[in-house]
Amino acid sequence: MAETLKEKYDVIVVGTGPGGAMTAKCLAERGKKVLMLEWGGGAAVKGAKTQGLSYFAELNKSVYFTNEMVMLVRAITVGGGSIVFHATASEPPYKLFDKYGIDLRDEIAEVKTEVPVAPLKDELIGPMAKIIAASARDLGYDWKPLNKFVYQDKCRPNCGKCSLGCPYGAKWNARMLVRTALENGAALLDYAKVDRIIVENKKATGVAFTRKGRKLIAQADKVVLAAGGIGSPIILQNSGIAEAGSNFFYDPFITVFGTARDMAGGAEFPMAMGAEFPEEGYSITDMTLPWMIYEIFAARAGRIDKLASHSRQLTIMVKARDGLGGRITTGGSIRKPLTAAEKWKLMTGYDRARKILRNAGAVDIFKSWWMASHPGGTCKISEIVDSNLKTRYDNLYVCDCSVIPEEWGRPPVLSLLGLGKRLAGHLGGRKAGR
């Protein structure tokens, strides 16, 4: 028998990634009584290798394998994937959202006054990234610095902890929004796994969740699902919206490695610079990895002979824009083929990455196995939610990567922050920040 919490809330936000955290923060600032529920924990980020890897340690929770053995990862922790993301602030595709009646321009402009968005200063760009950039430009590619979510005065060159969780407060993450929400009266329950939405007369009235072995129910006037591209559709499926989870994207990528003879690096900010090839459907960036993650990639590629060569690897990531397809089952399995067209994009990018690495003097070039990141499109705008992100149940909304309505192929965080701010404005009766 589930126990009902005594408190009733104005809004429950399920998930504390960028979309959910921004929604909770804006609503709490307006005096709303907000409860945040997070499946993961909120231990202080230390930047330690063991802690960083622990975010991806559990099969079918934080790491998944598709039927074609594409490895898909997500971070289950307070702040979600923003704890371990590479802090790339990709501009939203405004025209795509315009098609669905969503204008994010004002919200994104406000977000940029609240979080840092700028290319890294030259002194924060590592030597490996600079070598790759020089080679790419020499070959005629439009290789540019990427906007990053970084407080650059706090960033430490050659630190190498970006992918594990920044312990210095230099890399912005969604926990900073959670903290602001808490300072404005919101509540947070971590290790809370939401099972389903409680629906009465086609209206959401709360959520049922499990925390430390206890079955609990929290009640609220409104519920915002922000459990991510995998979590949100599973919760909706369990709540009577069976069509959630169909025809999604997962942005497949490969990582390409080449050994530089006279290098001793491997600890720098990843994705500092790159180039897009929109007609071919992929992008390329530098991608220096922490040595433990590099070893996993090398071992999975069968290159045991390269395990001790981390500090000499020039590394490039090729990320493709995949087509919509597949399904996330109620049991949480990921069923999506990597099509011939998508493999072609990745292999065409691989050929281009090899040229860049060879031109930079790298030898013994190899690639990782197929991987994927930030799955989305599982609760699409115009299918599962409307332009205000509301489901067919009154008082139930979704705000995460799952609502993106079309093929993607870019880091989603800046777009999700804008959507979170817009949703908070809708729920609060006026535009966020006005």
Image: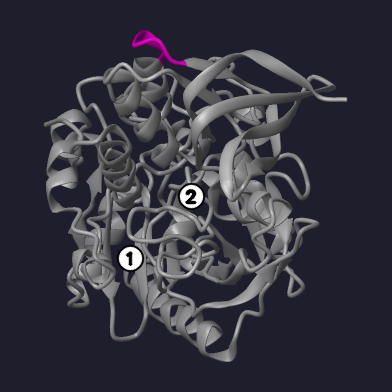
Task: State yes or no: residue 185 in magenta.
Answer: yes
What residue do we see at 70% from left, 50% from top? 63
Q: Main secondary structure of the magenta part?
A: loop
Question: Seen from this angle, which residue lies furthest bottom?
Answer: 340
Q: Amino acid at mark 1?
A: Ala
SS for dot 2: helix
Image quadrant containing the N terminus: top right
Q: Amino acid at mark 2?
A: Arg
Looking at the image, residue 385 lies above or below residue 169: below
Residue under pointer 1: 360
What residue do we see at 53% from left, 57% from top? 373
Query: Mark 2 vs mark 1: which is more N-terminal?
Result: 2
Residue under pointer 2: 312
> What residue range appears in magenta?
182-186
How many numbered marks appear?
2
Task: State yes or no: residue 263 in magenta.
Answer: no
Looking at the image, residue 166 lies above or below residue 394: above
Q: Is residue 321 visible?
A: yes
Q: CA distance from mark 2 to mark 1?
A: 13 Å
